[in-house]
Image (cartoon, rainbow, N blue to C red):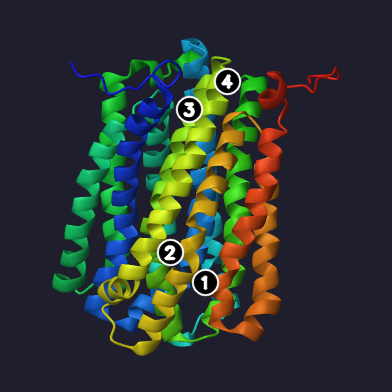
């Protein structure tokens, strides 16, 4: 039988990273299709007004769901280290702890989102003519955040043991289902923007169920038994620390995005539609960066568990080179296709939508290489077990977005929005480069600083 797992602790580094990353990359494409197809179908079927409604609540959606998914990714890092150390008992206990923490988190997010979403949309100055539509969409998504968390945790557990292929298979199935349901709910049942949300929830539920069935049947090492749910304070502290570190990192980043969204909302419905579309197009071009960082995270986690320092350093160097190459390709791609893609996804002929959307992409594209290195270093530090340093980079991003929203954008207009993230990425990348190469394990092969001379 074909083995879907990659041995990231023994196989040739470049080959193993690429083989492991390809299914993740394709998975990310289909994951992006969830929201992109919502955007495209809403824009073409329901128009600019409904497209702006999705965009106006996009930052809030990313804040709530991003926190849950960040926690899930953090939990899988602990599982990956246990797998790298070849400790199956610890592996099962880590999975059990991840389930317990995940259930508590999902309940908390559901309650908070249902109580605070509408007032938050009002606080963000969401235009009155799209407020009810925005709330209709995001309230449905967040009510079923457990479905999204379940799939991403299961997929993360499979990737933690080197299997990035099967999550891709399940995601392709659910993505195709999502597209079909989008069209059916909006064109046949006339459910409007809420139909897009319902389609996303159903499709992601299918992917979660398929993932769970596969784990129970094919990967028994990931199935804990009753004894593994016994609470271990040290393990739960590590799981919660790693999980909530990544969750708060995502929350801090997306809190800055929420503040930035308020500034964007002030420009009106057409500019919101332009920004929403450009972000979707940009999301596809950023996917190789996210894919590589996710792959390197698992690579570093497993090799840290196996105590292979030199292999970690070499893997990160290869990842940085690949990120720079992709950044160069992205610039050429955007020069050729930015405007046609904005027109295709938005379905709009408005000059404001096309001009602002395409210019946003052209300004951001030269900095995708910086973003790639940034994400790779951040997830590498997380894979090493570091919790605070990645949070510092998120704080830099948060305050950078606050400064732009309060000072720069009022003077520069929407051009200030275009400049915001590229400039912040440069500062974050510098901080993470310094932190990674000053890390004691990377410098000395130990988690503690060594005093003697190492010249």
Indicate which disc, 1 or 4, sits on the residue closer to the N terminus. 1
Foreground mark, 4 or 3?
Answer: 4
Spatial separation of the CA atoms under disc 1 and disc 4: 51 Å
Which quarter of the picture shows residue 156? top left
Kindly identify the residue that appears in the image at 24 percent across and 70 percent down: 41
Spatial separation of the CA atoms under disc 4 and disc 2: 47 Å
Q: Is residue 128 above or below residue 422?
A: below
What number is the disc on residue 319?
none
**Quadrant of the image for the C terminus?**
top right
What number is the disc on residue 139?
2
Foreground mark, 1 or 4?
Answer: 4
Q: Are marks 1 and 2 in contact (CB under 8 Å)?
A: yes
Q: Are marks 4 and 3 in contact (CB under 8 Å)?
A: no
The foreground one among 82 and 223 is 82
**Quadrant of the image for the N terminus?**
top left
Which percent across, then down, holds residue 100? Answer: 52, 31
Taking the image as shown, residue 454 lies to the left or right of residue 433, namely: right
User: How packed is label 4: few (under 14 Cα within 10 Å), some, or many (20 or more)?
Assistant: few
| Residue that carries the numbered disc 4 in the rendered image | 310
């Amino acid at each position: 039988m074909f083995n879907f797992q990659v041995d990231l602790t023994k196989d040739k580094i470049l080959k193993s990273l690429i083989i492991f990353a390809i299914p993740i990359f394709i998975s990310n494409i289909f994951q992006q299709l969830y929201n992109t197809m919502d955007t495209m179908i809403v824009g073409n079927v329901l128009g600019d007004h409904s497209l702006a409604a999705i965009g106006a609540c996009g930052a809030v959606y990313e804040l709530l769901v991003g926190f849950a998914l960040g926690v899930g990714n953090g939990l899988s890092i602990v599982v990956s280290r246990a797998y790298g150390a070849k400790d199956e008992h610890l592996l099962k206990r880590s999975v059990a702890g991840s389930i317990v923490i995940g259930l508590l988190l999902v309940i908390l997010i559901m309650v908070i989102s249902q109580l605070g979403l509408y007032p938050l949309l009002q606080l963000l100055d969401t235009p009155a003519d799209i407020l009810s539509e925005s709330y209709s969409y995001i309230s449905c998504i967040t009510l079923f955040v457990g479905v999204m968390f379940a799939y991403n945790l299961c997929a993360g557990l499979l990737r933690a043991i080197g299997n990035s292929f099967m999550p891709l298979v399940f995601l392709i199935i659910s993505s195709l289902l999502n597209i079909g349901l989008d069209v059916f709910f909006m064109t046949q049942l006339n459910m409007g923007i809420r139909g897009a949300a319902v389609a996303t929830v159903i499709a992601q539920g299918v992917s979660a169920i398929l993932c769970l069935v596969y784990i129970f049947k094919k990967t028994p090492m990931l199935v804990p038994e009753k004894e593994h749910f016994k609470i271990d304070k040290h393990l739960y502290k590590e799981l919660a620390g790693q999980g909530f570190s990544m969750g708060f990192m995502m929350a801090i980043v997306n809190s800055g995005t929420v503040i930035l969204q308020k500034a964007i909302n002030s420009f009106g419905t057409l500019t919101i539609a332009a920004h929403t579309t450009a972000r979707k197009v940009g999301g596809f071009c950023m996917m190789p960066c996210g894919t590589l960082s996710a792959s390197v995270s698992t690579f570093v986690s497993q090799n840290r568990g196996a105590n292979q320092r030199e292999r970690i350093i070499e893997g990160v160097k290869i990842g940085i080179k690949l990120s720079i190459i992709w950044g160069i390709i992205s610039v050429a791609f955007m020069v050729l296709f930015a405007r046609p893609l904005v027109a295709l996804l938005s379905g709009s002929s408005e000059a404001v939508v096309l001009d602002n959307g395409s210019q946003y992409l052209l300004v951001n594209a030269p900095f995708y290489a910086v973003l790639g290195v940034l994400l790779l270093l951040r997830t590498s530090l997380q894979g090493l077990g570091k919790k605070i340093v990645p949070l510092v980079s998120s704080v830099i991003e948060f305050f950078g977005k606050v400064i732009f929203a309060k000072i720069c954008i009022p003077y520069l207009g929407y051009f200030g929005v275009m400049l915001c993230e590229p400039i912040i990425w440069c500062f974050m990348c510098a901080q993470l480069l310094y932190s990674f190469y000053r890390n004691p394990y990377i410098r000395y092969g130990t988690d503690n600083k060594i005093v003697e001379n190492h010249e």
